[in-house]
Structures are given as structure tokens and as C-alpha cells.
Amino acid sequence: MAQAKITENTSKLASYDAYFEKAQRRKKLPRNLQETLTDAFANIPVSSFPQVPGGKVIEIDAETSIGDAVKILSESNILSVPVKNPAAQNSLDWRERYLGVLDYSAIVLWVLEGAETAAAAISASSAAAAGVGAGTVGALGALALGATGPAAVAGLTVAAVGAAVAGGVAADRGAGKDAPTAANNLGEDFYKVILQEEPFKSTKVSSIIKSYRWAPFVPVAMDSSMLSVLLLLSKYRLRNVPVIERGSPYLKNFITQSAVVRGLVGCKGRDWFDCISAHPISELGLPYMSADEVISVRDDELILEAFKKMRDNNIGGLPVVEGPKKKIVGNVSIRDIRFLLLKPELFSNFRQLTVAGFMNTIASATHDATKAATPITCELGSTLCTVIDTLASKLVHRIYVTADDGDEVVGVITLRDVISCFIYEPSNFFDNYFGFSAQEMLGN
């Protein structure tokens, strides 16, 4: 078992190295510019980065119930949260005090993947609270999980959690803007289920903390360099970095990929930023993946197949394409699960519900015909500045790169990719800076 874990960690670190080496190799920037910029970030303290809204980092205890965790994420309008170890409340060592970082999608995908036991405890009346008939939901669960027989009843749990996601419980900044009005009532019904019914009532965060989309707790100190943060958010694929004060285990800040990219927008007018961001993305080696590496979904495929692809490939979104030339016609993301699960009418023909039909439903539900029909894209000739502006203003995590004719998807640019454009990793940086290796930090 231990050997398998070591092998998995070694493979993970090798993929981090391969990604970053490709990024550095493809960038067509003068080496002295990259060195100067990396040195500059190495001398900027983390304490200079803006605080989280309200100035206090939200945390939850590992013994918090799933229902309460969902409620905290929703009310705090956040997507992820550090998880504390209740057995180490008085410890001054952050390694003992924190167990990891819980992403909201982990809750949803925990249900999708492990709902067989949970479903047995959810009654048909609870399913009705989510607006779905028990028979229909059971069939959906079988299709979603690739299950047959008794496992089909797992769909009851899927529907219940879907009510919460749809009802604005999804901790998605701005989610309330596109959630249908009917979702609010479903959200209220969901709380009745998740706070009163088993197994939700007694299931704790600790039981799913290391499930899908779990992230290790890898903090930096207030006097650490921003270079350490940028490397963790880019090369090492963390979506967020906790900030602590030396000698104290308590969190002082929580820096996300999105916050860094929004911060880059504020750097316009500075020579170093303008010098790099004025380049077309193709001159920076973006996108880092080739066209045949792009994972997409056809508009005539079942929407459940799209969510399976996201789950199996550990990605948060897919471009929707049509025809032999793979013309991009839309986008679906893991957060769109809320729409699949909230509307009872979707279940009446779920066996035939295509991605195209699903996108049309979203457009109708949000009263925004352009939402699904207009994917967020750029061209190879677009500047990095334009890409950064789009990612920040649209509050999205990826932008699709199309060929010059604006049709075929030839790549994807993520927040991680953008951050990678501005830095490189000095030799043995983490070994020298933290006193322990990246493998020790990320492999636990």
C-alpha cells in the first residue's frame, strides 16, 4: 500500500515537471527578462497580497457534517475551504492542525461516485422534495454511475444534492445570477433532507476529505515570497495556497489562482507586465497542449457522458464541438451539474438528453440565450493581456483557443497556464526555501 502511494506521488511530481518544462521550453521570451521577473517575485512578500474579503479566512472542522459544510460554503460565497483536525485544536504545528483543503465539487462528486449506501436511506418523499420521481431518479443514477441493478437507486442521492447545487448552495461567486428562481425553493427542501436525513446527517467532512478534487494543505508564511505562491499555483497545480504567520498555525490569508489572475489585471501600465502581456499567446507558446490533446464533447453526445469525461480526466470543463472539424459551439463545466439535477423535466427524457439539448435548457432557465451558445474563446493571435482580461472579467477558469477561422478548438488556456507565463523555477527552489522537498509537501 505504501509503495503504491509512493509510486503515485512520483508519477504526480513527474507530470508537474513535464508540464513546467514544456511551458518554459515554449516561451519565446528573453532569458534575462524571465530571470529579472522571477527575482522580482522572489523579493515580494506574501504579506503584500490583498486579504480575502472580510479579512478572515473561513475554516471548517473535519467533524463538520456534509450539510453544514455545504451551508458554510454557500453563505460565505467560496468554492473551497481549509479543513481543521479536531484532534489537534491546540497544536501550534500546521501539519497537525490542518488535514487539507475541501473543494465544493468534492461534495457533489462524492455523491455521484459513492452514493450506493447513502441512497438506501433516502426515502421517495425526500426525492420528491428535490422535484424528481424515485423511479426516474434511480434510472438516472444508474446511467450517471454506469451502474445496474441495486446501484440504480443511488440516483436518489444525486437528486438530493442536485437540489442544493441548483439552489444557489453551490459556492460559486456570482452563481446567484444564473440560477433559476425555482432553484431557491429546491435549496430550502434540500436543507431539510441533508440536515435531517441519514446518511447526510451523520456523514462528516473527514470521510470525503481525500476524495476527488481534494487538495493538500501546503501553506506559505506571510514573509515568504510571492514566487513560492505562483509556483504552487502553476507548476504544482494547487488551486489555492493558505498563508500562515511563522510561529503561529492560524491562517492569515488564502490565495487562489483566480485572485492572482485578477491581480495581474491591476498590473497594467507596469513595464514588466505590458512587455509580456502585449505578446500574442502563440509567441508565449500558448496553448501548452496540442490540438489532439484537447478533451472535448460532441453536441450530440449525452450530457452525462460529458460529466463522466470531466470526472475521469480530473478537469472542470469541456468545449462542446460539432462536425468533423470540431467547430466549437458551447461549453459545459462541472458546475453545470446543478442544472442537470434541478429541473424535473430534464429527467423525463434523460436517455436522449444531448449536450446540445442541455445547453439550450441552461439558456432557457437563465433567460440568457447567449450563455451556452457563445463559448469563451480567443485566437492564436490574441494577446496575453486580452486573455487575462477575459478570464478575470468572466470569472472563468479556462478559455478555449480557436484556429484563425474561429471555429476549430486547437487548445485550452487555464489560470495555471497564465501564471506560468510570468515565472520559472530556480534550481532546488523549494528544497532551499522551505527546507523540505516538493515531494514531501505534495505527497502526503
Image: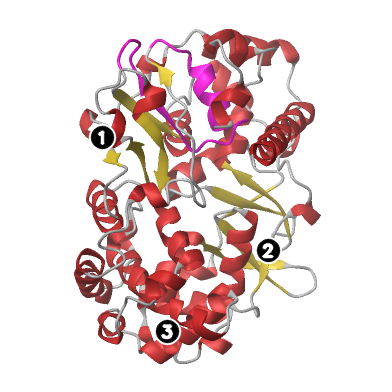
Q: Is residue 349 above or below residue 397?
A: below
- Residue under pointer 3: 137
- Is 388 left or right of 161, judged from the image as shown? right
In the figure, residue 198 lies in which quadrant?
bottom left
- Residue under pointer 1: 53
Residue type at mark 3 is: Val
How packed mark 1 is, by other alpha carbons closer than 10 Å (few <14, some 14-19, many 20 or more), is few
Q: Is residue 59 above or below residue 317?
A: above
Locate residue 20, reporting x and y percent.
70, 30
- Residue under pointer 2: 296
For image coordinates 48% across by 18% down, the residue present is: 226
Locate residue 265, reporting x and y percent.
46, 32
Relative depth, front residue between 12 and 115: 115
Residue type at mark 1 is: Pro
Q: Reading the chain from its start, which is encountered first: label 1 or label 3? A: 1
Locate residue 94, reporting x and y percent.
37, 23
Q: Reading the chain from its start, which is encountered first: label 3 or label 2? A: 3
Which contiguous range is marked in magenta? Answer: 223-248
Within the magenta stretch, is there residue 152?
no
Q: Secondary structure at mark 1?
A: helix
Residue type at mark 2 is: Ser
